[in-house]
Amino acid sequence: MKERDRFPYFREAACEAYLMLGLESEATEEFHGGIVLERLQGISVSTVFSDTCIVNRRKKDIARSNDDCSLLNLQLKSKGYVNQHDRIAELDLGDFAIYSSTEPYQLLCPCSYKELVFQFPKSDLLARLPNCELLTARKVSKANEIGRLVSGSLVDFSRTIGNADEVVQHYMKDTVLDLIATGLASIENSTFELSRPEQHLMLRARSYIHANLGNSSLTREMVANATGMSVRRLSDVFSREGTTIAAYIRLMRLDRIARDLLNDLFHRQPISEIAFRWGFNNLQHFSKAFRNHYRMSPRDYRRHGTPLYLAQPSTATKRKSPQRTPRRRD
């Protein structure tokens, strides 16, 4: 490749790998850079390296490509900066920060750099950390004990997740997202709402629920005991969030079931088995709850892949599902 074509090629590759972006570099004539990308189900993992450059996600880019996702940059070499919502995270080796695709952002790499990038649906992180959008462009430092643990684990996962079989990848993705939520929750000395004791309590409760969704005997008493609070106190906290403990457990179970219904790894598994795996032990109750939430039956959801309330044109990103051949009835 001719030297003058390197930077345009890198810019095109970045837009194809991630989102519509604007890239600038002073070294366009002798530019060196590359992207090693693994596209997995529900998450992409990539290693990016290049000479000095500036990445801008502008309003016009968002208008052309409005994928509602979150991204995480973990610095592997030199220094990098993540700028969003008038906040700037200065990332040294091992530090990381998240940013949102639906708001303008800027990534600054003042010298030759290397970084690890995770890209995933924002909804997956919101389910674990309701205030994650308040945490964009906030550094999770490797100097912090939890930050160091999460950073090292993310690097280790990036080295192995692409070589794992599909079943293992499915579970590794959830583990990676749990790690990211844990790292973000560890940020100290901040003024965002999560720092309030009630939000920390909610985070612990949600984390326990996510880890035990498959237990059909999961109760609000178990959640309260795991967080060291009374049922009444914990119920009050959930009430302020506009929900109940039981409703949140039910919603998270339905979300996991919906994901598995669209997962090709489980396309031969009966819907009833998927429901049992995520803690429903009454199929009539499950079918009613699923229909009430997604406005279609589990079988129709598996066949069509888009709930009716998401099927209407809107500014939100619509889920794209591949055409599938009819499958056997459960």
Image (cartoon, rainbow, N blue to C red):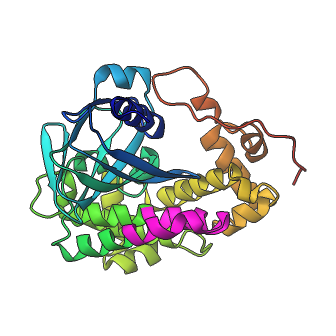
Query: In the rendered image, is residue 107 in sight?
Result: no
Q: Quadrant of residue 215?
A: bottom right
* Frontmost residue, 186 versus 49: 49
Q: Which residues are magenta?
A: 154-176
Query: In the rendered image, is residue 44 in sight?
Result: yes
Q: Position of residue 62 (x, y in %)?
A: 36, 25
Q: Main secondary structure of the magenta part?
A: helix
Instruction: State left or right for residue 91 relative to residue 224.
Output: left
* Frontmost residue, 3 versus 90: 3
Instruction: State left or right for residue 296 relative to residue 245.
Output: right
Q: Position of residue 130 (x, y in %)?
A: 34, 51
Q: Residue at x 42, y 41 (%)?
A: 69
Q: Is residue 167 above or below residue 217?
A: above
Q: Is residue 200 above or below residue 112?
A: below
**Residue 169 highlighted magenta (yes or no):** yes
Q: Position of residue 136 (x, y in %)?
A: 24, 47
Instruction: State left or right for residue 93 relative to residue 320.
Output: left
* Residue positioned most to the right: 328
Q: Is residue 292 above or below residue 11?
A: below
**Residue 216 highlighted magenta (yes or no):** no
Q: Quadrant of the N terminus?
A: top left
Q: Quadrant of residue 200?
A: bottom left
Q: Residue at x 42, y 45 (%)?
A: 122
Q: Position of residue 262 (x, y in %)?
A: 68, 48
* Frontmost residue, 306 versus 41: 41
